[in-house]
Image (spheres, helix red, strand yellow):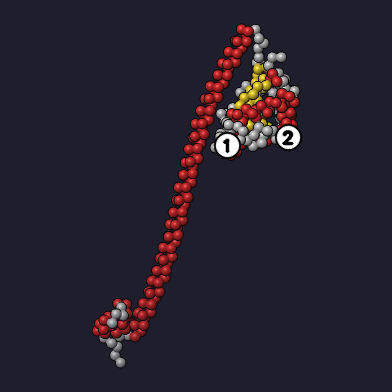
Amino acid sequence: MQPPSCGTCTPVIRRGIGVTLCALVGLLGCADNPMVLQGRLHQFEQQQVALSRQQEQLQARAAALDQSNQELQTLAAQSRQEADLLEKQLQATREQLRSASARLAEVREERQSAENQVQSLQASLRQRGSVLITPNTSALEDVPQIKLPGVEVRRDGDVIRVELAGGRMFESGDARLRAGAEETLAEAAAELARLYPRQIIGVEGHTDSDPIAGGRWRSNHQLSTARAMAVYDVLSTRTALEPQQLFVVGHGPNHPVVSNATEAGKQRNRRVELVVYPEQASK
């Protein structure tokens, strides 16, 4: 039986089998040696397998590139978020720096004003022949060693500040002393009386920046003054400190030691300070 001639491709194409099948039929029909046909068919099959493998590899590479692209997009989004966060933190730091600079300028002005007032007072007392309150800066060389919970001692220029944490001393939003607060005041006063038996000591009340919400106090200044008065009452009646050594000031939120931007900062700013001045009280 003779193999079909090359002309048999035409009816195959018309039936829609395809160009590849036509080429295969052409090879079968146009070749004289069956071994050659078989070799060519085997070669064609190998090429098809190689092409399939290459296609699979390309698809795998495409999938890997898609995955890498998604990861890069995720990293880019995270980087943008981190950059935004850093920018906000930088802006907050700049605001705190501006606030601290403004506060420093205010403190310098207040100190200069206080010095002017002291000089005016001394001049007035000299004219009246009264006993002067004389400074004694050498008495403040020793910083008191008061190791009590909620009590911090620090030097601030030419004064000594004994900081009493408001949260440990008072009920929330009130001027009532907590249990154990009087014992703390007594121990602190004993050390102050030992080191500074005649120094002027200011009892200064401070609050955070949150406005008063209800209660018996109309403002933070009233609350800070009431708390300072509660401490003054204990110091002047139950310790060795003399009433003429003490004076009371309510600063409200005007003199924070740290920023009120955080709850921890607000807690630190709620305090009463015993401020030891270089001046001595007259007997």
Reading the image, the residue beneath label 1 is: 213
Camera-side residue of 42 and 228: 228
Reading the image, the residue beneath label 2 is: 180
Label 2's element? loop
How many neighbours does mark 1 have within 10 angstroms: few (below 14), some (14-19), or many (20 or more)? Answer: few
Q: Do labels 1 and 2 touch, CB within 8 Å?
A: no
Q: Which amino acid does label 2 sit on?
A: Gly
The quadrant holding residue 276 is top right
Residue at position x 30%, y 77% in the image: 19
Instruction: From the top left corner, tell me how far across and down residue 10 is, in percent.
Output: 25, 82
Instruction: From the top left corner, tell me how far across and down residue 256 is, in percent.
Output: 58, 31
Drawn side of residue 247 relative to residue 116, left or right:
right
Is residue 195 visible to the viewer in this orientation of the structure?
A: no
186 vs 78: above or below: above
Drawn side of residue 26 relative to residue 208, left or right:
left
How many neighbours does mark 2 have within 10 angstroms: few (below 14), some (14-19), or many (20 or more)? Answer: few
Between the residue at mark 1 and the residue at mark 2, the CA separation in whole angstroms equals 27 Å
